[in-house]
Structures are given as C-alpha cells and as structure tokens.
Image (tube, rainbow, N blue to C red):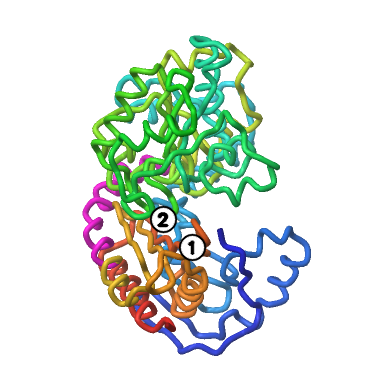
Amino acid sequence: MATKEFPLVPESVAPVKTKYRTICTQIPVPESISLLEKLRDLESRSMGGQPPVIWDRGEDFTIYDPYGNKWLDFSSGVLVTSSGHGRPEIVKAIQEMAGRGMYHAYCFATEIRVKLIEKLTSMLPAPLKRVFLLTTGSEATECCIKLARTRGLQIGGKKKSILVTFENGFHGRTMGAQLAGGSPALKSWLGGEDSRFVQVPFPDGFRQENIDFEVFESSLSEKGINSDDVCGVMSETYQGCNATLMPKQYAQALRKWCDEHKAVLIFDEVQAGFGRTGKPFGFMHYGIVPDLVACGKGLSGGMPASAVLGTDELMDMYGPGEMTSTHSANPICAAAALANLEVIERESLVENAAKLDPVLADGCRRITEASKGKVGHWAAIGLVGALQFIKRGTSEPDPESAWEMVRQAVQKGVMLFAPVGVGGCAIKINPPLTITEDALLDGLSVLEEIAGSLPV
C-alpha cells in the first residue's frame, strides 16, 4: 500500500487549459498549504496519503478546487461517485429527506427504506432475494463472514469454520476484513495469522500464471485443509489492486466446488457493483450466482451506505434484533442510494461502461507500451483499469514510478488517488460512469504522455 506523503511544497507547472482540465497555479496551490498542514498536524498520519489538492466542488466527471483549477476525475472518489459528482437528483433527494427532519431512524421502518430495498431486490437474480443495509464495505464483508461461519457451524459443527479467500485480495480495514484479506502487510498489527482464514492464489495470469482451478484445490491440500471444513469462499469479483476478473471457467468450477462441499460462495462487489464492470453486478460476467454479495461504494453515489444481498436461507438465520447496525438504512443515505440507482438505470450508465470498455482497455495498452517496461501488467473491465508498475526487467514492484505517475497526472489536470496494491505499485483508473469517450481519451492521452517520460 502507499506509504509516501506528497510534499507540501508548491511547484511551478505548465499551465493547462482544455475542455476538461484547467491548471492555472502552482501545485500544490500556495494558498492551500496552511489548510493541508493543519490536517497533517491534527489528523492521524494515515490520512495524509492523497495528492495535496483541496476538493471544493464537483460537477459530473470533473473536480474543482477553490483556486481556479479543474481536474478530470479518474478516481470517482475511490469508485464511489458512479453517477457523477453533484448529481441534481441525488442532491435533491438528500435535501428533501433532511428537510423533513428525517436524518436518522435506526431500524424503525421508513418508506424510503422500503423503496430502496424494493429497487435492490428487483435487480437480483435468483436465488438472491434478501437485502441487509449497512454503512461501509467493511461492514458488509464482515457480515458475509459472520453468515458463512454461522451456517458452517450449524451444518458441520466447530470444524466447519474455515473461510478461504485469495492472495492480494482486499476486503476492508476492520479486523475480520483484514484477516480475510490477502495482503500480509495489512495484518502485521494482528500479531499473527488466524488458522481459520486461509488464502490461495488468485488466478490473475500475472502473479499467478497457472489459472487452472486445480491450483485452488491443491493449495488447500498443501495447507492441510479438509475441504469439508470450509464454511465459505470469498473473493473480490475482480481484484481491486489489478482490475482482473478470474477466468469464467474457474468461477464456474468454484461455484460447483462450493455446492459439493456445502460452502457459502461470497463475492465482494464493493468495487464492482452497480455498473462499474459494464454489467449491473460484476459476478454476471461469470454466468453464476453467489450465495452472498457484499456491496458498497457505487451503491449510493457518495453517501455512506452498503448492503449484503443474500438467499432466504442465509438471511433468515438471525432473528429480530440479532443482526442490526446503528446507521443501517439511514434515511438520507437511503434516499441518495435510491436516486443514484435510478440515475444509473435512466441514463443507461451500465451500458456506457460496457461501451467504453474497449476504449479504456486500449488506453491501458498504449500507456503500457509507452512505459517501455515500467508497466509490467495492465487490466481493464468496463470503466475500471489498473496499471502495475515494476522495475524494468524484473517482477519487483516499483512504487516510485507509480507515485510519480500520480504526481504528474495531478499537475496536468487528471485526478488519480495514491498507488495501491502489492508494494503500492498499482495505478487505478476509474472515472464516473457518466464519462464521455472524448473525456476518457483526453485523460488517457495524458497518462500515456507521462508513462513515456518516466525515468529509467
């Protein structure tokens, strides 16, 4: 993961004035330094990892600071603002709900909760049928872990409590989510591994070249895991750090394996859901349906809202009051989420992501070629892409080049978030689903230019 702070030293950069990008000051802006320094002095150090820009307002797929600069947003605020920034429909929904004094309701029934859940269930393929609304992606993945464990204990006793996940996977920052995650660096604070959380290689064709399902089974065997002791298998639909789907035949074999061993199949769709991959849900690329789905980010268009989608059997295990959350179905968040989903449907944003899939893929390919070996692997699906930076001639991560790509992109008017993934070497490209082909090509051309200028 990213470990580097961007320096708070104003730097003179070439001015930019295009249809989608404006840079008219030093970066970072001198007038912003006192505010940025105050944040670094008063917040936890962990909050200082993003480019030093004061976000002031957003408009569709662009971001403005208070000083006259404008960025083409390739971040979507970390894959959240799928229907664009400042959507009038979402703003209106938030204002109307807040204006009624309805900004909290705990688990008491509200009409907006009914409407949102009806909307979500209408999108689900059988046998997915039930919805549990929460606040964050981590909450959703933790809930999925809880449900899989509970079912395992019910049908197989204490032994059936092992959750299988994938190397390099990310499921959130809470304790259970990080135990399930596949990054050892994020688990160091835990003081050791938990034997009930087991990771196997993810078939990305990059770090794990052998993409046969046999690797899944042999990995469990090598770790001494009895397949019938597995309560569930959880995977990101595409791995967030590299935007790679597992092969379709692998996913179908995994579905069959889970059925044979009575394990719950969970897809973490926190990043992939609601059109990001060019389909309503990312798992639809596989031709299978999981037992549980964790959703977040793109669900609400900007408000803290997440959801667990599941079968009757799994969602009925806990009785009234036994599985709740203080801010579950918060009325303002629910209103925003419903408005967001209606925009996505009305404006065919899922279809737009599918249409622009080859444009983004070609852009990632051109950036990779321009890097002359600095980008060791690229992947793209729908409107999410990833570039894995390596030290030329090796497979070793190159966080310095990835960091430099972000720094220069921001200076040229393209907003990226800090490098992620193994060694902090991956650059993510994920603009709002509203982006036009012209705007997407403009931003990709900037990144291609930067890739060609990176030092050896």
Classify residue 329 by image quadrant.
top right
- The answer to whether the residues at label 2 and label 1 have Cβ atoms under 8 Å apart is yes
In the foreground, 206 or 153: 206
Q: Amino acid at mark 1?
A: Gly
Q: Please say whether residue 366 is one of the residues in the magenta stretch.
A: no
Amino acid carrying label 2: it is: Gly
Counting from the top left corner in percent of width and height, residue 44 is at 73, 58
Q: Secondary structure at mark 2?
A: loop
Q: On the picture, is 352 further left or further right than 223?
A: left
x and y, in percent, of residue 396 in the image: 46, 65
Image quarter (top left, top right, bottom left or bottom right) of the C terminus = bottom left
Q: Is residue 345 magenta?
A: yes
Spot occupied by residue 223 in the image (x, y as percentages of width and height)? 49, 33
Query: How far from the left and from the top, in percent, is residue 303?
Result: 54, 45
Which quarter of the figure is the N terminus placed in? bottom right
The magenta stretch spans which residues?
339-363
Alpha-carbon span between mark 2 and mark 1: 8 Å
Task: Report the residue marked by disc 1.
Answer: 58
Magenta stretch, overall SS: helix
- Is residue 374 positioned above or below 360 on the image? below
Which residue is at a point 48% across and 18% down the rendered structure image? 315
Residue under numbered circle 2: 84
The structure residue drawn at horizontal position 52% and vertical position 41%, both measured from the top left corner, is: 171
Tell me the crowding category of disc 1: few under 14, some 14 to 19, or many 20 or more residues within 10 angstroms, Cα based.
some
Q: Is residue 115 visible?
A: no
Q: Residue at x 47, y 82 (%)?
A: 23
- On screen, residue 291 versus residue 100, left or right, reads left
Disc 1 secondary structure class: strand
For label 2, the crowd category at 10 Å Cα-Cα, with few meaning under 14, some 14 to 19 and many 20 or more, is many
